[in-house]
Amino acid sequence: MCGIIGYIGKKEALPIIVEGLKRLEYRGYDSAGIVIIDETNTPYIVKTKGKIKDLEEKLNFKKIQGTFGVGHTRWATHGEPSDANAHPHFDCKKEIFVVHNGIIENYSRLKEQLQKEGHRFITETDTEVLPHLIEKYFKGNLEEAVRLALKKVIGAYAIAVICLKDPEKIVFARQSSPLIVGLGKGENFIASDVPAILGYTKKVIYLDDGEMGVITKDDFQIFNLDNQVVSKKSHYVQWSLSQAEKGGFDHFMLKEIMEEPGAIQNAIRGRIMLEEGMVKFGGLENVIDKLKNIDRLIITAMGTALLAGRVGEYMIEEYAQIPVEIENASEFRYKKPMLRKNDVLLAISQSGETADTLFATKEVKRKGVLTLGVINVVGSSIAREVDAGVYNHAGPEIGVAATKSFVSQLTILALLTVFLGRQKEMSLVMGRRILEELLKIPDFVKQILAKRDKIKELAEKYQNYQNFLFLGRKYNYPIAQEGALKLKEITYIHAEGYPAGEMKHGPIAMIDKNFPSVVIAPKDSVYEKMISNIQEIKARKGKIIAITTEGNIEMGQLADDVIYIPKTLEMLTPILSVVPLQLFAYYIAVLKGLDPDKPRNLAKSVTVE
Ligand code: AGP
């Protein structure tokens, strides 16, 4: 939610900041702004409602010369998207500029106080209290003023601050919202996320909560809010710039779906010991003894990651015989869960920054439970919070809709099933069987992707329906929910995902010729039950798009349209069945002229509760 970039060096700051904002746009895209300071110490501020392309239009190739500045792309929390509410925000004298990601929870009390003291506010944002507070404490040193101001603030923030009276530096701070420092030669950066600066440096420092600092063109320093210097290690980022670009595809979403075979391979690579029917997770080695005594696994996550966890529940309970509970992180945090000694928490998150998942993890960790993570973004907040974990290595996922991260999460959950199961009752034969089948999955996904034109045709045929029901059972019940989530998220078509058995308990009332159902019915242990549900829909004249196993002739006679997926183990079918659903949603969005990478009202990484 909201993207921040700051640059200080010898180059022109404007193109670097605008390019960085484009790479951060997945974090929020309802308004944007920049401030660049030129060599005469004059600030150039451009702010606009809309996307980065609107900002570029407003800049209209203006030659704004200056070698340091900050930029922001916004996802509104307080105050509607407008030119005025766009960041940067400034103080009364227009000398202190702040960009902010997060929410200042005590802003109204601070604002009231500042107004009484004579500060003038011109926006509806919570952020605007920051430049005024900093102004209040400024005595010539920006770091000190920011530090004193932040001591008064309650909430979540990643901020970058520039001040004309203490120039040639950018001061920054982090509390519950991500921020990194990028280190270059004769230039330094700050950013919400790595892709923003990948074109310039791969050497980064991940800030922790309660840390702040300052960059100049040649130096940096990090300290805490008590003014104690904190020594931090820098990390080398493995991602390449091309991974963070569209590479000839119209949208990141399609590119990322097409990358799924590679994402699955990356999740598997180096982790399978086929002979032994075992799995090796380097990141879990330190906690292996504790995992041998696990009594219950609690999986927490949000959105698509939560649905991956739900598939994991079926896998782990069936094959590893460990009880699993799924907890929506936003609810879990506020529950009074009955935690036991040998419980283990598993947080799943692509971004590693989802606030609900992070806070739920912190709360459970505080209660003494072992916490694990399945995380894609290296060095992210949840990755650093958990006791141990597994990285997805899926590469950057820029499209707001989670796609390749989902199949990667499912792959890791299948590996985890073998990892945990083999420490309990799972036989060598069963361990090998699952792993052998898993190794075939990347090719199976390639086969589905090769037939994407067929799914495009279906998208053309069904694009004008207003409602869809998605149905599945057992392993494919969460996939029904994921199919519905993808469709509503990027096409704004109403869709619901249900366990097929639930249909008769209410949703069937909606079925008629205008209400199609997408039925996920591979040839598995619940196939016959799915056929009964299909008959029930047909009896009410509902149209049916079915996803089933290759060679299933019967389905051709029952459903209006059929998408075939290769035959695999029942527990692995979700990794295949979800792919056509992602493509179906993608093509409908494109046909409707919508941007699937930036669906309305959404942001990639939800860093506020
Ligand atoms: C899925 O398409 C969504 N964008 C969303 O549900 C997402 O999966 C959720 O916000 C969790 O994100 P995370 O994996 O980064 O924690």
Image (spheres, rainbow, N blue to C red):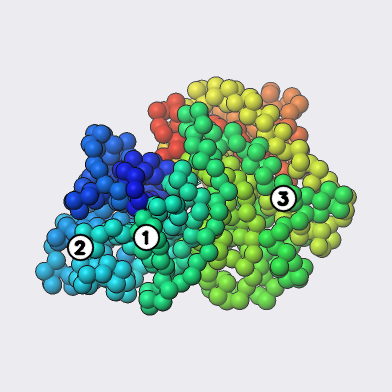
- Horizontal and vertical percent for residue 541? 56, 28
- The amino acid at mark 3 is Ala
Mark closest to the chain's N terminus, 1 or 3: 1
Query: Above or below — where is 283 with respect to 25?
Result: below
Instruction: Specify whether 144 is left or right of 424.
Output: left
Please report the residue visible at 60 percent of the width from the left and 26 percent of the height from the top: 452
Please indicate, yes or no, whether residue 529 appears anywhere in the rendered image.
no
Give the mark toward the camera: 1 or 3: 1
Report the residue marked by disc 1: 215
Label 2: which residue?
165
Question: Where residue 83 sits in the image (x, y, percent)?
Answer: 22, 46
Q: Residue at x 32, y 36 (%)?
A: 53
Secondary structure category for the residue under label 2:
loop
Q: How crowded is the residue under tag 2: few (<14 C-alpha within 10 Å), some, or many (20+)?
A: some
Name the residue that disc number 3 marks: 414
> Which amino acid type corresponds to the residue marked 1 in the rendered image?
Ile
Label 2 is placed on what type of residue? Lys
